[in-house]
């Protein structure tokens, strides 16, 4: 089995911890930060060996690490690097993801014009990729921002693309069980999308 599933797991485990970090207690934060570093080190190795496939993930992780360390200028630069790298290497789904997380970063910093710009780019990339449900979610969740011209001040409620309540850990666990038990990608696809 290739590393693709493990890379996805590494990235989304990292992002789940980044998402939950502000709401954790002190000792939980220490554990979460340790786990984020562990996942980041894995991605760092993969990105060193194959930057075309993994460097955009590494930059996104580094942006989140900088954000949580209150290094906002560095975080902003790293979001842009993640977006540019994903675009250059033709990964529209990750270009969309990086734009979305950058938009949420700027909303948290009360920089609505920048947030609108990144959110519109994310919306476009998800549309181009064919992620119909994700486009609908953005339309529902950020209707005012997608329609906005970019003025005004953002709300702290838009700090992240999803809330903890929206993150379905049961589904994530089941997906990981499926990935680890399947012998090849064809078996996974048959179980996930039996009608295709």
Image (cartoon, helix red, strand yellow):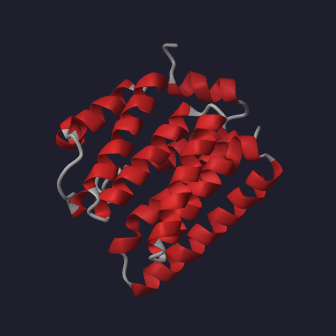
Q: Position of residue 52 (x, y in %)?
A: 73, 41
157 to the left or right of 188: left
Q: What residue is rendered at 51% in x and 54% in y?
A: 79
63 to the left or right of 7: left
Q: What residue is rendered at 51% in x and 18% in y?
A: 194
Image height of 43 relative to 146, above or below: below
Q: What residue is rendered at 70% in x and 65% in y?
A: 41
1 to the left or right of 188: right
Instruction: Kindly tell me whether residue 96 is visible in this rendering.
Output: yes
115 to the left or right of 94: left
Image height of 194 relative to 20, above or below: above
Instruction: Kindly tell me whether residue 14 is visible in this rendering.
Output: no
Q: Position of residue 40 (x, y in %)?
A: 64, 63
Residue projecting furthest to the bottom: 26
Question: Would you identify the image quadrant in which residue 124 lies?
Answer: top left
Q: Name the image quarter holding the N terminus.
A: top right
Residue projecting furthest to the top: 196
């Amino acid at each position: 089995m290739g590393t693709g599933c493990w890379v996805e797991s590494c990235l989304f485990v990292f992002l789940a911890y980044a998402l939950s970090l502000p709401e954790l207690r002190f000792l939980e934060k220490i554990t979460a930060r340790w786990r984020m570093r562990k996942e980041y080190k894995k991605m760092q190795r993969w990105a060193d060996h194959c930057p075309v496939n993994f460097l955009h993930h590494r930059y996104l992780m580094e942006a989140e690490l900088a954000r949580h360390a209150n290094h906002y200028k560095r975080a902003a630069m790293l979001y842009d690097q993640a977006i540019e790298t994903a675009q250059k290497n033709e990964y529209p789904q990750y270009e969309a993801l990086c734009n979305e997380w950058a938009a949420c970063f700027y909303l948290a910093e009360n920089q609505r014009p920048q947030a609108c710009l990144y959110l519109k780019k994310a919306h476009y990339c998800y549309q181009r990729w064919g992620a119909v449900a994700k486009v609908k979610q953005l339309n529902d969740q950020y209707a005012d921002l997608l329609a906005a011209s970019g003025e005004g001040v953002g709300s702290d409620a838009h700090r992240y693309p999803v809330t903890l309540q929206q993150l379905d850990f049961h589904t994530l666990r089941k997906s990981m069980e499926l990935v680890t038990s399947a012998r090849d990608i064809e078996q996974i696809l048959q179980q996930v999308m039996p009608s295709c």
